[in-house]
Amino acid sequence: MNIRSIRTRLTIWYTGLLTVTLLIVGGAAFALLSYNLSREMDRALDSVARAMIQQDKSRSAPFLPSEIDQAFRRFFGFSPWDHYFQMRDPSGNRDERRSLPSTGKLPLSAEALDNAMRGLSSFETVNGLGEHPVRILTMPVMESNRVVNLIQVGMSLQSMDETRLRFLLIMAGVLPLGLVLAASGGWLLAHRALQPVDRMTAAARRISAEHLSQRLEETGTGDELDNLAKTLNQMLSRLDSAFTQIRRFSADASHELQTPLTILKGELEVVLRSTRTPGEYQATLESALEEVDRITRLVEGLMLLARAEAGVLRMDRQELDLGQVLEEVYLRLKPLADSRAIELRLGSIEPIGIRGDRDLLQRMTSNLVDNAIKYTAAEGRVTLELKREGSRAFILVSDTGIGVPAEERGHIFQAFYRTSQARCLAEQGTGLGLAIAQSIAAAHGGAIEVENVAGGGSNFRVQIPIGS
Ligand code: ADP
């Protein structure tokens, strides 16, 4: 038995508490029994004394042993040999005629005599008269307000002691038996209640990173363990999707890195196969440099995403005018838009001051504008706006391009995700632009949403809290 297991500890606690409770209840019952027995005995002694006084008043002859016996039987229900009865005169002298000589002499304490002289009865318990202590009642016999005699009635406490001993013996037998039964019952109950935990532990042990699709058994009872199983299953689902995402991300990242490396290797191998003219070498090196640039951009983007994900994105926060950031992006990308016959225009730009990282915000806006130019055909239009709504700044990048299908809107912010329409275009991107933009917005306490514009094109809305 594992002493640290919950079922063992529960059983020990339960049995311990039950023992204490039973001891307290047993002790109280024993005290109550003793008290009631003493009270009953005092009452019976009082009744015997009164009956004998009554009898004594009705005739002058001494009591017969049979009469005393009768009185004891009437009030105690039995009359063992060691009952006592005696009469004394007011000065305390024993009246031999009216005492029961066979049962021995009852002592008269100074206090009892004193009480009797004042017309009061006294109860005392004395030892040494027999094997057991004796309870004595000393009662004055009054006649016209005068003490004429003292009557003393005594009864051995043997039967009372025996009753109390019987009670203790029963308790001593029943209590351990009850405790053993209750402890076994408690252990079985705890065992039954905790069995699902054992099953859950075994199932959880089987679930590894490779088997995250497995789930724990839910009993459907709605109890604490069922809730625990449900919560753990929800956690497993989240882990499962996180793992799937990470696996897909690593696969996509290696694929994206592999493509430029393969091109690079191929180009270099081809050029090395035979002697080339300086112009051919130059062209190959320029193409190789393009691929190296692409790899560098990819690696740099991946690193930025990884840092943002881990919450360790380096941010150089400073007070800046968001409108100015947008104007700089506009000026930088205007030549690109012009080269593609796309009209890039600045809409209304409100001057909004925020605390943020200028380079990161520029990068975020560039990615959005760059995409808008990339996914818009010639003669199209891309508009850049900045608005304030309450305590938020809104950067709006709208275009008249291919738009984002509603069912793909939830995915385009994932790294390497491309819409089917975009894949058909010759345009090549790293696939990280929107993921990076979203991370930068999030690092500034904001978010990016996308919606399609009526009549074609899309509208990206970056929302950034001004107080951030
Ligand atoms: P990419 O390098 O492929 O552009 P992004 O992360 O920047 O990667 O964008 C992800 C995908 O979102 C794109 O491949 C494209 O399918 C879609 N997308 C982004 N911006 C636009 C836009 N302005 N219009 C239409 N589709 C867009």
Image: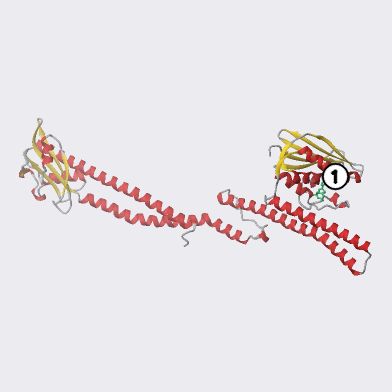
Dot 1 amino acid type: Leu
302 or 189: nearer the viewer: 302
Residue 266, compared with residue 91, is above or below; it is below
Residue 208, image x, y percentages = 64, 60
Position of the C terminus, as image quadrant, is top right
Residue 64, compared with residue 205, is above or below; it is above
Label 1 CB sits under 8 Å from any ligand 1 atom: no
Residue at (75% x, 35% y) in the render: 352
Residue underneath mark 1: 333
303 or 152: nearer the viewer: 303
Residue at (23% x, 49% y) in the render: 160
Residue that sits furthest to the bottom in the current view: 274
Element marked by disc 1: helix
Q: In screen coordinates, is 312 left or right of 227?
A: right
- Specify how the rendered protein is coloured: secondary structure
Residue that sits furthest to the front in the current view: 278
| Count of numbered marks | 1
Identify the image quadrant of residue 211: bottom right
Residue 453, image x, y percentages = 84, 39
Residue at (76% x, 59% y) in the render: 251
Identify the image quadrant of residue 369: top right
- Callout 1 crowding tier (Cα within 10 Å): few <14, some 14–19, many ≥20: some
Q: In screen coordinates, is 452 left or right of 390?
A: right
Residue 195, image x, y percentages = 54, 57
Residue 132, image x, y percentages = 18, 52
4 or 43: nearer the viewer: 4
